[in-house]
């Protein structure tokens, strides 16, 4: 046996024993290898492992020790946690408590919060209606309405959604089927919450029941509690006799009132689909359907006209949107979903409300907030910070949620799908890792689940900041350190 092999073997056994004696943290460990040829050291390491029959935990310990001396990680801050949800045990860790930039693994929080609050089967509705009457010549003496519900995928053609062109084509056909040849009024766009989308309504806003949806009327600020009537039957709180609905700021329960005495709307509500309305108007005129009025955005309407439904468009289910976001790491959709979730929970479409909604959800789930800085919903901001242990524990806790199967399916699979398709292709971990990737300048992260050969599902977080070298180099090192975990 060469001196180098003897040295590597001695180091591997020593640091394995040291790791079990001192727990799972390697923060203070230090080891050097007297070789100027990294490729040779790598081959020697593989030879040592093969001949000595190291356990999976020992191989992980060896990998951590090796990464501490790797030139690519010389100036890096990084951490790793592998966690067993069944035993609630940390199996392996390094720098588990240091705050690190998570990059796009931030989307794990955004998408899971949406699924928890809205449900995997949630759909957004965009409805076409008209007010007034249609005469015998097909002239509509009234207005055309487009009632939106905050669909973040509307018209994009992504995540299974329909393009604007196809939606407009369907709307024009439906207008023709309604025998409308001319519109004397305007095309009015509004935002609403549809009844078949939600049982509870977003907080902080008073909603007027209208047709098959609820229109925003005003703020619950300064509302008079004397007019409140408690909704007792939680499963079906709405009927045709009730008018104004809101989450009472006094008892935090759904109530209704026959009159509205509160303030006008102070917060922002979802932008109605104005682009769809303008495009529809232009296409109708080209198709020979005259429109005398213009496009008007009427988000506040305390006395809505009576109108009839012409047709509606439904988005894909939320599960499909989450799948698209996590597979492609789409930043625009992630930020839109953050704001939409904030609206459906707390009645406001701002990013700040979206972030508050996520932290509200995390608090309900006893999330470990140590070191957390939640700056956006996509992970683009370098102000985002998270510790590997809190991320791993969060993922571990999700295995007990009813929407976990759909959530797990949304994650890229090693060597097979999404942003992991080109990773682990020649690795023993091929098809065994389900995880969200993250990439910023000098930041590379990977967090999700490992399916072991023994049938266990482990949660893990591997976050690397400020590394040297190329993205491909750091990806190979991340693959190498995680590979032994499939034998845990």
Image (tube, grey):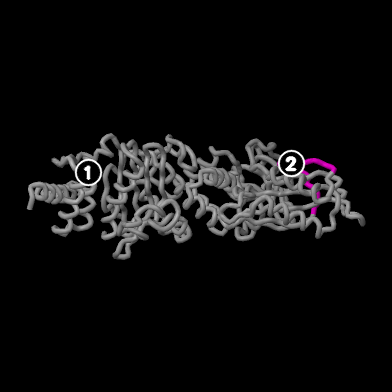
Q: Nearer the viewer, residue 88 or 155?
A: 155
Q: Position of residue 340 (x, y in %)?
A: 58, 46
Q: Please name the residue that numbered disc 2 is placed on.
A: 298
Q: Residues within 10 Å of mark 1 (few under 14, many from 20)?
A: many
The secondary structure type at the circle numbered 1 is loop
Q: Quadrant of residue 346?
A: top right
Residues drawn in magenta: 292-307
Q: What number is the disc on residue 26?
A: 1
Q: Is residue 463 visible?
A: yes
The Cα–Cα distance between marks 2 and 1, rounded to whole angstroms, is 59 Å
Q: Position of residue 435 (x, y in %)?
A: 40, 53
Q: Position of residue 187 (x, y in %)?
A: 78, 45
Q: What number is the disc on residue 235?
A: none
Q: Quadrant of residue 413?
A: bottom left
Q: Is residue 51 left or right of residue 356?
A: left
Main SS of the magenta part reads: loop
The secondary structure type at the circle numbered 2 is loop
- Locate the C terminus by quadrant: bottom left
Q: Is residue 123 visible?
A: no
């Amino acid at each position: 046996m060469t001196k180098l092999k003897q040295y590597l073997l001695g180091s591997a056994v020593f640091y394995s024993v040291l790791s079990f004696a001192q727990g799972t943290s390697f923060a203070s460990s230090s080891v050097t290898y007297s070789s100027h040829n990294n490729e040779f050291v790598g081959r020697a390491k593989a030879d040592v492992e093969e001949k000595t029959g190291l356990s999976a935990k020992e191989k992980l310990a060896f990998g951590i020790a090796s990464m501490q001396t790797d030139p690519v990680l010389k100036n890096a801050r990084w951490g790793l946690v592998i966690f067993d949800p069944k035993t609630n045990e940390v199996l392996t860790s390094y720098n588990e408590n240091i705050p690190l930039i998570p990059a796009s693994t931030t989307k794990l929080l955004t998408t899971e919060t949406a699924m928890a609050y809205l449900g995997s089967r949630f759909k957004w509705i965009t409805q076409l209606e008209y007010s007034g009457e249609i005469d015998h010549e097909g002239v509509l003496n009234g207005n055309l309405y487009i009632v939106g519900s905050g669909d973040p995928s509307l018209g994009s053609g992504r995540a299974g959604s329909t393009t604007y062109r196809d939606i407009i084509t369907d709307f024009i056909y439906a207008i023709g089927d309604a025998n409308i040849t001319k519109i004397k009024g305007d095309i009015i766009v509004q935002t609403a919450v549809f009844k078949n989308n939600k049982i509870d309504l977003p907080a902080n806003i008073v909603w007027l029941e209208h047709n098959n949806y609820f229109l925003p009327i005003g703020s619950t600020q300064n509302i008079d509690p004397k007019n409140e009537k408690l909704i007792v039957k939680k499963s079906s709180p709405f009927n045709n006799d009730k008018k104004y609905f809101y989450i009472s700021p006094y008892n935090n329960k759904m109530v209704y009132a026959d009159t509205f005495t509160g303030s006008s709307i102070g917060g922002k509500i979802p932008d109605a689909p104005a682009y769809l309305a303008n495009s529809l108007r232009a296409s109708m005129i080209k198709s020979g359907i005259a429109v005398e009025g213009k496009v008007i955005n009427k988000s506040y309407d305390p006395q809505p006209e009576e109108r009839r439904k012409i047709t509606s468009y439904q988005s894909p289910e939320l599960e499909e949107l989450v799948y698209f976001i996590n597979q492609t790491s789409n930043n625009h959709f992630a930020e839109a979903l953050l704001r939409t979730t904030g609206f459906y929970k707390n009645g406001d479409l701002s990013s700040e409300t979206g972030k508050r909604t996520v932290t509200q959800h995390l608090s309900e789930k006893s999330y470990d907030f140590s070191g957390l800085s939640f700056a956006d919903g996509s992970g683009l901001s370098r102000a985002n910070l998270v510790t590997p242990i809190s991320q791993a524990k969060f993922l571990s806790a999700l295995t007990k949620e009813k929407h976990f199967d759909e959530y797990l399916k949304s994650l890229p699979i090693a060597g097979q799908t999404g942003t992991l398709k080109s990773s682990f292709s020649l690795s023993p971990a091929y098809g065994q890792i389900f995880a969200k990737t993250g990439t910023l300048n000098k930041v590379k992260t990977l967090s999700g689940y490992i399916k072991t050969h023994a049938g266990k599902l482990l949660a893990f977080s591997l976050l690397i900041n400020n590394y040297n070298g190329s993205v491909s180099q750091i990806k190979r090192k991340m693959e190498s350190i995680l590979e032994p975990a499939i034998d845990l």
